[in-house]
């Protein structure tokens, strides 16, 4: 590249560029540190109130509930961040992009999280060494709720960062850290692992404030992004719960429950989201096909 287009190396310093970078970069790194304190620091408090065994149960429940969330959310976040930043001058396009990205995440994570929750008792029954995880069945629904809320709202904090509202994100991070200490730490000292799990659900529920704030900035659609996969997941859950109560625990029935849940979810999703998917496909085809 140097031979094709040579240039003379030198040193330069742009105060305005440094200032712009630091205004965004420092709060962004601080948010990462606050998130670390919020998620990992609480373990120190829980260790004193519920003991090592309780911390193990809570940590395992949290990681299991977030497996599918991390699998889908991290790649989507990396792609959507620069996309949102480029669209911030076009509110209509930005609102559509936010709606579609949330729909995509919820479409993938809602059924995965709920189906795994329903199948956990069957998996434990089939693998005797997993019986030590039976205590998590009582409070695991709280983490299912938290994971579903996160899949719907994480894109909103990503949006705030992308359009330069990094200080607002910092304010929310501080709020969640305080709420985590108060509710997770406080309730764990009163009700043990159940209190800690309930505290996590309460903190996740506070994300409603993010939805309210972002809705004022970007008019994304909640009814198009969250409700269709939620309804489809509820229908799937009802079918899988019914099958679990009727069928004995064995590998074949485990596969039958998984397959039935998948078919029911995809079928109901096509009913709720099908017209929107067809509309999006037409837009893509219209952009690809040369105009005469």
Image (cartoon, rainbow, N blue to C red):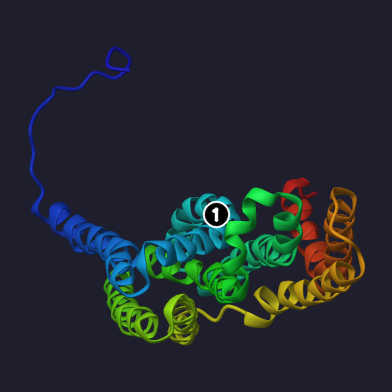
Residue 139 location, x and y as percent? Answer: 57, 75
In the visual, does 196 lie left or right of 143?
left
- For residue 206, above or below residue 163: below
Residue 109 location, x and y as percent? Answer: 65, 62
Location of mark 1 (residue) = 76
- Mark 1, Cα crowd under 10 Å, few <14 / some 14-19 / many 20+, is some
Give the quadrant of residue 280: bottom right
The residue drawn where x is 45% and y is 82% is 195
Give the residue furthest to the top: 3
Q: Is residue 93 visible?
A: no
Q: Is residue 176 visible?
A: yes
Q: Quadrant of the N terminus?
A: top left
- For residue 202, above or below residue 283: below
In front: 245, or 219? 245
- For residue 122, above or below residue 193: above
In front: 155, or 18? 155
SS of the residue under disc 1: helix
In the visual, does 56 lie left or right of 30?
right
The residue drawn where x is 33% and y is 72% is 169
- For residue 283, above or below residue 129: below
Residue 153 location, x and y as percent? Answer: 51, 73
In front: 288, or 110? 110
The residue drawn where x is 33% and y is 79% is 185
The residue drawn where x is 32% and y is 61% is 40
């Amino acid at each position: 590249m140097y031979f094709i287009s040579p240039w003379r190396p030198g040193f330069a310093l742009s105060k305005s560029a440094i200032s712009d970078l630091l205004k965004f970069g420092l709060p962004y790194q601080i948010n990462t540190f606050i998130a670390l304190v919020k998620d990992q620091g609480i373990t120190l408090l829980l260790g004193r109130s519920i003991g090592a065994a309780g911390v193990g149960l809570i940590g395992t429940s949290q990681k299991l509930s977030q497996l599918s969330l991390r699998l889908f959310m991290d790649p989507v976040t990396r792609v959507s961040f620069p996309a949102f930043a480029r669209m911030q001058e076009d509110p209509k396009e930005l609102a559509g992009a936010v709606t579609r990205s949330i729909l995509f995440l919820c479409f993938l994570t809602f059924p995965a999280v709920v189906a795994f929750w329903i199948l956990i008792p069957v998996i434990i029954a089939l693998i005797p060494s997993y019986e030590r995880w039976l205590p998590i069945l009582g409070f695991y629904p709280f983490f299912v709720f938290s994971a579903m809320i996160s899949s719907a709202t994480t894109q909103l904090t990503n949006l705030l960062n992308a359009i330069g509202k990094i200080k607002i994100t910092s304010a929310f991070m501080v709020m969640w850290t305080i709420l985590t200490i108060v509710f997770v730490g406080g309730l764990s000292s009163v009700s043990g692992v159940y209190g800690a799990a309930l505290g996590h659900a309460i903190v996740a529920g506070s994300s409603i404030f993010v939805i309210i704030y972002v809705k004022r900035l970007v008019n994304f659609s909640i009814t198009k992004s969250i409700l269709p996969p939620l309804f489809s997941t509820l229908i799937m859950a009802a079918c899988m719960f019914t099958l679990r109560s009727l069928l004995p625990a064995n590998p074949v029935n485990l596969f039958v429950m998984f397959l039935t849940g998948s078919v029911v979810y995809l079928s109901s999703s096509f009913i709720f989201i099908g017209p929107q998917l067809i509309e999006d496909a037409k837009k893509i085809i219209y952009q690809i096909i040369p105009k005469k």
